Amino acid sequence: MLHRILPSGVAHGVYGLRSPAVFLLIASAAMQLSFAAWWTLLNNFAVEVVHASGREIGIQQSIREIPGLLGFTAVFWLLFLREQTFALLALALLGAGIAVTGHFTSLTGFYLTTLVMSFGFHYYENMSQSLALQWLDKREAPVWLGRIVAAGALAQLATYAVVFIGFRTLDIGYEAAFAVAGGLTLAATLALWLLFPRFKEEIPQRKHLVLRSRYWLYYALTFMQGARRQIFAVFAGFMMVVQFKFAVHEVALLFLVNCMFNLLFAPRLGALIARFGERWSMTGENLLLIGVFIGYALVESPWIAACLYIVDGTSYTLGIAIKTYFQKIGDPADMAPTAGVGGSINHIAAVFIPAGLGLVWVLHPDWVFLIGAGFAAVSLVLARLVPLDPAPGRETVLTPAPQAAE
């Protein structure tokens, strides 16, 4: 039974099939049901139906990141909505935006549906992070965040398999694929609304923007994470389609394998973060990404490129360490407003980098990935400033040690 695997301390002692932890697991899967399909079909839909070039893809991805830049506005919605309710409404908006994507085949329509689904996606991500950091015990948060990633990976696995079969053997169209994917997320969201209670907020969250100087390293790490992840999110997949001529079913198969790795390793990576701490986890992630990005720039074999892509995608789970680092140093009442502010900071670079690097791509595609290696190197330097045992008053290794009482 599922309730037996919930350890003590999770979600402030709320257990069972209708616990906050299970809510987060199912919500993660619900989000990926449609987003994974949208992401799999994106590049082929853009090239084959919308007739977009690298320049238009870069612009579209920058548009996708605008709602992330506006993530801080989530705190204003919380003046009227509970976080759990807002998370479900965001999921519904995501599903609806993806469901209608196939009906809008012009470049303008493509940009519009991207904007709608992206508001849902980014508001959900912010609320999900805030709720997880409030509901999960600090000692077990990395483990459970890894399991949440794995739950999303399981939904991705099913989605990629269906897309692979649908486009490989059933000749399914883009319009039907987007509609079914978005509809499944809407159905799952309705189930979450009807079957789960409204969980009590243990610590009331501040309903205004929060920017604190002692959180500066968290902000810097979040900014650089947003910068370097754009290389993977935008250009690595685009490289597979443009440079190595991957068809839809081949892209789906690549995502399927990547998803299987996440399903297998995400809980283990979460456990490693809990065991070795955030500093070493961030260090390992950025060293790995430097090697992957340099590999992207030099690769000529589609098989090697695919392997690099899988390593890149699997390493994303180690980004949990930034969230749990903040959970350890942050004021408990700052979780919701800082999730929004952190999301905005993460997307400052994300709004401008895809469009800017899209222009670089036209001239020298390999330069895009070398720039990504530079982003990872900066992140590595910042990671080394994280204390081995972060806590309020001990946010960085540069923080002066408290004076001993005389």
Image (cartoon, rainbow, N blue to C red):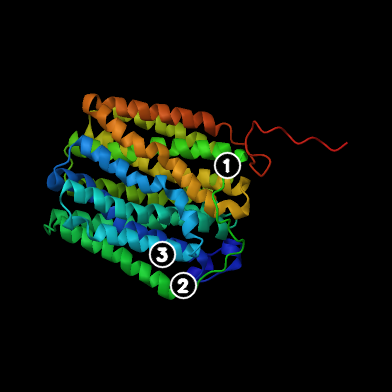
Q: Residue at x 46, y 61 (%)?
A: 24
The vertical placement of 297 against 84, above or below, is: above
- Camera-near label (2 vs 1) is 2
The vertical placement of 352 against 298, above or below, is: below
Residue type at tag 2: Phe
Residue 23 position in % (x across, y down): 46, 65
Residue type at tag 3: Leu
Residue 211 position in % (x across, y down): 57, 43
Marks 2 and 1, how far apart in space? 34 Å
Task: Give the numbered dot on residue 196.
Answer: 2
Quadrant in which residue 170 is drawn: bottom left
Q: Is residue 188 visible?
A: yes
Mark 2 / mark 1, whichever is N-terminal = 2
Instruction: Determine contact: label 2, label 1, CB under 8 Å.
Output: no
The kind of secondary structure element at disc 1 is: helix
Marks 1 and 3, how far apart in space? 34 Å
334 sits left or right of 166 in the view: right
Q: Nearer the viewer, residue 85 or 307?
A: 85
Mark 1 / mark 3, whichever is N-terminal = 3
Task: Give the numbered dot on residue 276.
Answer: 1
Marks 2 and 3, how far apart in space? 11 Å
The vertical placement of 105 against 373, above or below, is: below
Task: Give the numbered dot on residue 88.
Answer: 3
The local crowd at label 3, few if under 14, some if 14 to 19, many if 20 or more residues have their Cα within 10 Å, is: many
Extreme residue toward the right, this view: 406
225 sits left or right of 396 in the view: left
126 sits left or right of 329 in the view: left
Residue 399 position in % (x across, y down): 67, 33
Q: Nearer the viewer, residue 180 or 57?
A: 57
Tell me the quadrant of the picture where the C terminus can be found.
top right
